[in-house]
Amino acid sequence: MSKKSTNSTLKFLIYTMVFTIIVFIFVLFVVIPGIKEYKRLQGEHTAEKRAKQALQQEYGTLQKHLEVVKTNNQEVIDIFFQEFNSTSFIANAKKYFDDAKITQVASDSNSSALQVYQFSADAQAQNPTRFYEFVKTLHAYDGIIKINFPITITTENKLLKINFHMSVYSMQHK
């Protein structure tokens, strides 16, 4: 073997060693941390995917439950969206009570579409029959009505004094 071929073989071996060292350093400092980062991100992605699936499943369950509630309570929902007529309500109430008033409560910003009315009534009677008749008419009335307790019934000079308050709920129609 000649000196020239030994010299070129030696250069080749040195270049190969340098190349191997550079590749090793590249793998050590670039590829391995990249793989670790990839595995970490893959784990986060998997956890987020599971959380998303759990939320979608819960959403589906709640959506089904909402549909069941809507189906079972469609009549109440329809009544809620009917327009409330306070003048006819007062006209009906004055048939049963001496003093009947209704006022609209100012709605807060969270539920601006909701209208709330406060109804108060005072009456004097020999027996509470007129009060019970009025309560019966509320069942036929188109509106969501809540009788607020306590209902005050006192006796004075052989007459019953009845005082009570109600809330009426409706959606605001534009």
Image (tube, grey):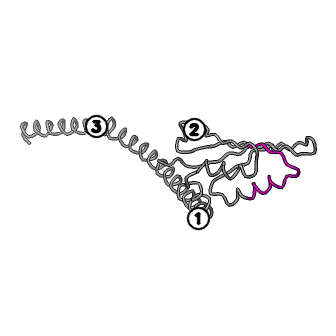
Mark 1 crowd level (few <14, some 14–19, many ≥20, 10 Å Cα)? few
55 or 61: nearer the eye? 61
Q: CA distance from mark 1 to mark 2?
A: 28 Å
Q: Residue at x 53, y 55 (%)?
A: 59
Residue 100's image quarter?
top right
Residue labelled with disc 3: 26
Q: As displayed, is residue 106 above or below residue 97?
A: above
Residue labelled with disc 2: 107
Does residue 123 show up magenta in the picture? Answer: yes
Residue labelled with disc 1: 71
The amino acid pointed to by label 3 is Phe
Q: Which is more foreground, mark 2 or mark 3?
A: 2
95 or 78: nearer the eye? 95
Q: Is residue 156 left or right of residue 47?
A: right
Q: As displayed, is residue 27 above or below residue 128?
A: above
Q: Is residue 78 left or right of residue 42?
A: right
Q: Is residue 83 left or right of residue 35?
A: right
* Residue segment shown in magenta: 121-136
Does residue 19 show up magenta in the picture? Answer: no
Give the percent coordinates (x, y) of residue 136. Answer: 75, 58
* Marks 1 and 2, the one that precedes in the sequence: 1
